[in-house]
Every structure is written in structure tokens, then in C-alpha cells.
Image (spheres, helix red, strand yellow):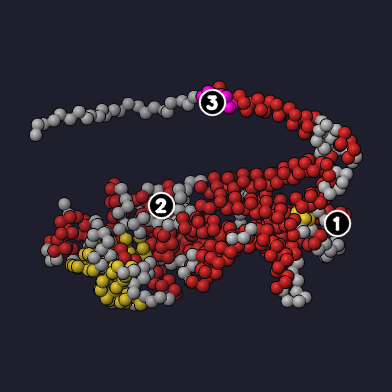
């Protein structure tokens, strides 16, 4: 075998460190990179610009320039070429409060304010403590008093009179607050080593996931009373609320289970090795990590739960959307349903988009300085 | 060195701290531990070695019930290991464990990793637990990392935190399951140094490791396992110079260069 001269080599170098090359930036570069990077993209960009050019002006003149903002005469609206936002001004009380007695609407406003401000307060990390939980209990009590009446000289307003935004918000908060603990228990139960608990949880989750929400609500409102003994009635709102909670819990349980499965066996073993009991281990080690992993998926489900509240109008409860549909039964204003629904669309968007932004913020916050 | 530590550690109690009598374990049909008999005296250090899959990890994991054995008796500090949650938790409080993959809690700071056990299990006040934790972090030479998260530490630092965490409950025996196998070479010694110091202070230790230098230096007994059984057990001087079994000789020829 002849000796071969190796041709591999490397040059050790000790030049001073340099900073990274400057990134090119600027609006022209951005345009060229994103909108005009190839002939296809240029054609698409020009087409999109043309489409915007022919639709935007019409929309602006309809929505703003020619719109009627304030009138109690629908005739003026019919004559105008633009949108009739006056329908919102005229009907907003019914849209937002449904069948709640007109002169008691201030109680609804107060209830909404309480729920929304508590929700906003809860987003600040510096308020995260035991007292926040107490405050939520207090607010829930206050909201119930406001909406039900009957004490402190408030007229009694039964849940059959509830409607609009207070109903939507109350049902949503109730669904999440009642559903999350149940979801966690179901997820833990599904992984339990006790066969009875395990099959019970699997059975519940699979049955509830196997039927549409409407079916659950119909069951709650129509079939459930048939099975109750004579004379025992549970009110319709509560039945719908329980149905919503069960439905939300079944879906969220599967999301939580995904998080539990993502936690390595080593975490369970380390918790065992330092002597923690099952619940200490679950509460302090496993759940905090598992819930953080599934937070985006969980928030997705929470936002869906908010929108799912619209289904209750099917069994005769007037949520915001249902109340709006009722308000538009007025033949004088029925022509302007589109404008009313755009208003509702914006209302839902504001709620859902805030929740989605908030979850993004929490994700960033929780991952700071930690490598999971 | 080992003689001194023995006398320092007995603190009055007599008799062995860990006993395994005819322990058998199966995974399905696979016989993972076969008639394992091992007795560890108070303050003594036992190093367990052997090829991977030989059952050495399974054996020490049986001692604090991370694995369940099907036959035989395991006795820790006079308590027999039975399938009773309270008994198991009582035994786990006497036994500290250090894992190959550290298994620190990533969502807690280093100090919280240490204090969680004592605060929740022994209901020691938080500030008292923190003081103990800082002492232990000094001992493993990383007090300055106390308020960081595990993900911000190097592997060697994480393993030293894990050792400190296991010491928090003042265990009577420490189990090490390949504590340096997941570490980069330059970090192995910082962990071994901490373990040697611990040994010198008289801690009872059962160590599964491939670090033969460590075994030579601190072990009172070296146990060689293969195919789920203890093949040979001897003090390090005899184990390394005059191994009797052929399987031991083959293993030693592979790990000692």
C-alpha cells in the first residue's frame, strides 16, 4: 500500500471578533421581497390592488359617507343609499338585554361591567393570588344578585327573563369556570390506574364528544325533565348551563390529557422520589407544566365556548345573537338586519380577539427564562 | 477515608440500612431481576456496575418503589416495602434519589426545586427550608444559581442541584442511577467531586455507574450485575485485581483501557 498524502487542512486563526453583517431593511426591500418577488407574485399583487380599488370606495361610501347614523324613522333609512346604523341605535337595548325588563337594564349594564372588569383585572399577573379567587366569588355573587333580583329592593327577575349580553357572558364564564376543573379531573381519571374510574371517564368523554352540542342542549331542555320525578323542576337556564359545562369539559379534557402525556416519566419519578403524594405531585409538578404546554389549544377551546353560547337560542334562551334576531322581527326595521348583524359581528370579534391576544401574551410571559 | 466515614455515619442505629432478599422482578415474560440478594450497611458505599440491560437500574429503582418487585423482600431502615401508599411514602422520605437525566422541575427555580419536598411533605416553614437549601447549594458549590431556572444551567450544574434536592429531606441513604452518563466529559468531574465529598461525610450510597475510578476510590463493595443477576461482589481492591467470574473479567476488559 503506497503512502498517500492527505490533502485535508485547516488554518487556525485568531482575528478579532466581528459583529454580524447588517441586515438590509427598508420599505422598498420589503415590497420587493413580499409583493414583487416574481412575475406570478407581481401579477397577483396587481390583481389584488385592482380588486381592492373597485370594492373599497363602494364600501366606504356605503358604510360611512351615505350611512344614516341616527334616526328613529326607518323611512329615512330606506331612502338613503348607505348603511342604516340607526337600527343599532334604535334596537340596541333589545339586542344587548333581550327580554330583561326595560327599566332594569341598568342592572344588566352593571353586571357586564363587573364581569368584564374582573376579566381585565385577572389578566394582570400582579393580581394573581388567592384574593383574585375571592374577588371572583364576590363578583359572581354580585352578578347573580343583580340579574336575579329579589333582595335589596330589586325586583325579582327570573332566569327566564335573562337575555342578551349578560346572559352570554354569564353562560360563558360559568362554562369555563365550571368546565375547567371537571376537564382536569376527567383527564386525570382517564389516565388513572383504577379501572372503574378510568372507564367511567373514557365513557363520559367519548359519549359527549360523539354528539353535537345542539343534541346535548336538546337533551338538557327537553328530555331531562321527562326523567325527573313529578314536581321536581330545574330551571332551563341551569340545565343549559350544565349542558354547556359538560360539553366543554369533554373537549378540554382531551386537550389536558395531551399535556399530561407530554410530561416525561422522569418528572413523575422525581416527584415520587422527593416524597410528594399523588395530589401534591399533580398540583405542583404535573399540572403546571401540562397546562402550559396546552395553553394555546385550551384557549382555542375557550374561544369556541364563547361562540358556542349562541346555540342556546335554539332552546329558547335569548343570548346576544338570539336577542338580535328577535329585535329584527320588528317589520319596520327588518330590512336592516345586515347592519345589526355587522354590529354583533364586531362585538364577538372584540371579545374573541382580546382573548386570543391575551393567550399569546400569557404564553410569552410563561416561557420567559425557562426552557421546557 | 472509608474507615473514617463508617464510624462517622452510624449515629447509634445498628444493623444494615437496605436489605434485598431473593428479589425477583419480571417485565411481562422478561425476567429482569433474578434472586437478587444485597445488604448495605449504614455509612457504606456500594457501587453497582454491569452492561446496559443487566438490571442494575431496575434494582435500585425497586428500593424506593419506582419499580415494583414481584417476589422477595426489600427492607429499608427496618421498614419492609409493601404495597401501602403510606409505607412507600415513609420509605421514600428516607431515600434520596439522583437520576441520569437530572429530572429537575423545569417550571420551578432552583431554590423552589429544593424547598418543595420539605415544605409539602414535612411541612417545614418556607424560610427555614430556604436556609437549608442555601446551605446545600453552598455544599454543591452553586449558591449563585439559586434563583435561576434549571433550563439556564449546564448539565453538571443541574445534576449538582439534583443532588442537593435529594439531600433536602435528610435521607439516610442516597441512590444514584448513572448520575454522570448524560453529562459532557468536562462536567463529569464536578459531579463526581460532590459525590466523593458526600461519601467522605459518611452518607450511605448505592451508586450505579460506569465510573470505575470513582468505584476504586470510595466503594466499600463493588457489585457486578449481568442478565438480571448479581454475578460477583467484592471490595474494590479484589474486584479490580482478582475478578473470579469470566463475565466480570470480560466486562472489566471492556471498560478499563
Residue B169 part of the magenta segment? no
Report whether residue B27 is seen: yes
Element at badge 3? Answer: helix
Q: Which mark is residue A40?
A: 3
Residue beneath disc 2: B143
Spot occupied by residue B198 in the image (x, y as percentages of width and height): 31, 61
Dot 2: chain letter: B
Q: Residue at x 34, y 57 (%)?
A: B100
**Residue lying furthest left:** A1
Q: Dominant secondary structure of the magenta stretch? A: helix
Q: Residue at x 37, y 56 (%)?
A: B102
Q: Residue at x 40, y 75 (%)?
A: B83
Residue beneath disc 1: A101
Q: Residue at x 68, y 58 (%)?
A: A214
Q: Is residue A2 left or right of residue B78?
A: left
Pick whichever of labels 3 and 1 is earlier in the sequence: 3
Q: Which mark is residue B140?
A: none
Dot 1: chain letter: A
From mark 2 to mark 3, how far is it between C-alphas? Answer: 60 Å
From mark 3 to mark 1, how far is it between C-alphas? Answer: 59 Å
Observer-nearest residue: A294 or B90? A294
Crowdedness near tag 1: few (<14), some (14–19) or many (≥20) residues, C-alpha within 10 Å: some
Spot occupied by residue B206 in the image (x, y as percentages of width and height): 29, 65
Query: Residue B134, located in which quarter of the rendered image?
Result: bottom left
Spot occupied by residue A146 in the image (x, y as percentages of width and height): 79, 59
Q: Mark 2 and mark 1 in contact (Cβ < 8 Å)? A: no
Amino acid at each position: 500500500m503506497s503512502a498517500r498524502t492527505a490533502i485535508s487542512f485547516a488554518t487556525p486563526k485568531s482575528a478579532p471578533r466581528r459583529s454580524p453583517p447588517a441586515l438590509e431593511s427598508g420599505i422598498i426591500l420589503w415590497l420587493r421581497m413580499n409583493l414583487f418577488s416574481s412575475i406570478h407574485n407581481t401579477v397577483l399583487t396587481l390583481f389584488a390592488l385592482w380588486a381592492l380599488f373597485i370594492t373599497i370606495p363602494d364600501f366606504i361610501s356605503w358604510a360611512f359617507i351615505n350611512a344614516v347614523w341616527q334616526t328613529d324613522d326607518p323611512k329615512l333609512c330606506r331612502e338613503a343609499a348607505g348603511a342604516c346604523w340607526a337600527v343599532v341605535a334604535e334596537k340596541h337595548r333589545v339586542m344587548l338585554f333581550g327580554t330583561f325588563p326595560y327599566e332594569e337594564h341598568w342592572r344588566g349594564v352593571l353586571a357586564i361591567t363587573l364581569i368584564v372588569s374582573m376579566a381585565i383585572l385577572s389578566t394582570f399577573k400582579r393580581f394573581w393570588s388567592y384574593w383574585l379567587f375571592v374577588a371572583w366569588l364576590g363578583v359572581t355573587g354580585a352578578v347573580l344578585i343583580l340579574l336575579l333580583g329579589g333582595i335589596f329592593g330589586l325586583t325579582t327577575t327570573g332566569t327566564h327573563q335573562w337575555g342578551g349580553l349578560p346572559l352570554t357572558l354569564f353562560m360563558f364564564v360559568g362554562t369555563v369556570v365550571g368546565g375547567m376543573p371537571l376537564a382536569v379531573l376527567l383527564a386525570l381519571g382517564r389516565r388513572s390506574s383504577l379501572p372503574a374510574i378510568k372507564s367511567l371517564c373514557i365513557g363520559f368523554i367519548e359519549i359527549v364528544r360523539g354528539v353535537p352540542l345542539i343534541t346535548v342542549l336538546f337533551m338538557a331542555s327537553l328530555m331531562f325533565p321527562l326523567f325527573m320525578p313529578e314536581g321536581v323542576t330545574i330551571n332551563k337556564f341551569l340545565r343549559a348551563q350544565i349542558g354547556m359545562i359538560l360539553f366543554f369539559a369533554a373537549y378540554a379534557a382531551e386537550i389536558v390529557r395531551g399535556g399530561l402525556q407530554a410530561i416525561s416519566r422522569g418528572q413523575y419519578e422525581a416527584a415520587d422520589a422527593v416524597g410528594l403524594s399523588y395530589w401534591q405531585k399533580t398540583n405542583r409538578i404535573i399540572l403546571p407544566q401540562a397546562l402550559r404546554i396546552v395553553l394555546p389549544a385550551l384557549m382555542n377551546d375557550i374561544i369556541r365556548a364563547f361562540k358556542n353560547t349562541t346555540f342556546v337560542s335554539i332552546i329558547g334562551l335569548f343570548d346576544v345573537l338570539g336577542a338580535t334576531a328577535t329585535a329584527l322581527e320588528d317589520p319596520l326595521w327588518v330590512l336592516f338586519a345586515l347592519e345589526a348583524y355587522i354590529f354583533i359581528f364586531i362585538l364577538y370579534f372584540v371579545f374573541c380577539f382580546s382573548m386570543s391576544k391575551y393567550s399569546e401574551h400569557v404564553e410569552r410571559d410563561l416561557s420567559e427564562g425557562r426552557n421546557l | 477515608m472509608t474507615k473514617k466515614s463508617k464510624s462517622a455515619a452510624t449515629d447509634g442505629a445498628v444493623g444494615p440500612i437496605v436489605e434485598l432478599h431473593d428479589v425477583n422482578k419480571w417485565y411481562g415474560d422478561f425476567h429482569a431481576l433474578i434472586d437478587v440478594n444485597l445488604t448495605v450497611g449504614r455509612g457504606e458505599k456500594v457501587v453497582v456496575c454491569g452492561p446496559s440491560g443487566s438490571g442494575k437500574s431496575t434494582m435500585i429503582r425497586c428500593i424506593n418503589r419506582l419499580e415494583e418487585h414481584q417476589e422477595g423482600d426489600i427492607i429499608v431502615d427496618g421498614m419492609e416495602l409493601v404495597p401501602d401508599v403510606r409505607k412507600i411514602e415513609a420509605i421514600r422520605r428516607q431515600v434520596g434519589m439522583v437520576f441520569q437525566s437530572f429530572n429537575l422541575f423545569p417550571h420551578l427555580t432552583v431554590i423552589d426545586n429544593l424547598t418543595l419536598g420539605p415544605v409539602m411533605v414535612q411541612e417545614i416553614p418556607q424560610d427555614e427550608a430556604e436556609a437549608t437549601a442555601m446551605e446545600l447549594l453552598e455544599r454543591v458549590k452553586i449558591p449563585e444559581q439559586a434563583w435561576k431556572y434549571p433550563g439556564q444551567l449546564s448539565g453538571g450544574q443541574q445534576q449538582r442541584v439534583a443532588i442537593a434536592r435529594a439531600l433536602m429531606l435528610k435521607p439516610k441513604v442516597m441512590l444514584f442511577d448513572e448520575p454522570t452518563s448524560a453529562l459532557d466529559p468536562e462536567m463529569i468531574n464536578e459531579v463526581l467531586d460532590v459525590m466523593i465529598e458526600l461519601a467522605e461525610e459518611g452518607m450511605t450510597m448505592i451508586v450505579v455507574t460506569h465510573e470505575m475510578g470513582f468505584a476504586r476510590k470510595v466503594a466499600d463493595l463493588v457489585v457486578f450485575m449481568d442478565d438480571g443477576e448479581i454475578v460477583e461482589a467484592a471490595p474494590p481492591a479484589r474486584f479490580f485485581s482478582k475478578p473470579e467470574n469470566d463475565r466480570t473479567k470480560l466486562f472489566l476488559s471492556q471498560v478499563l483501557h
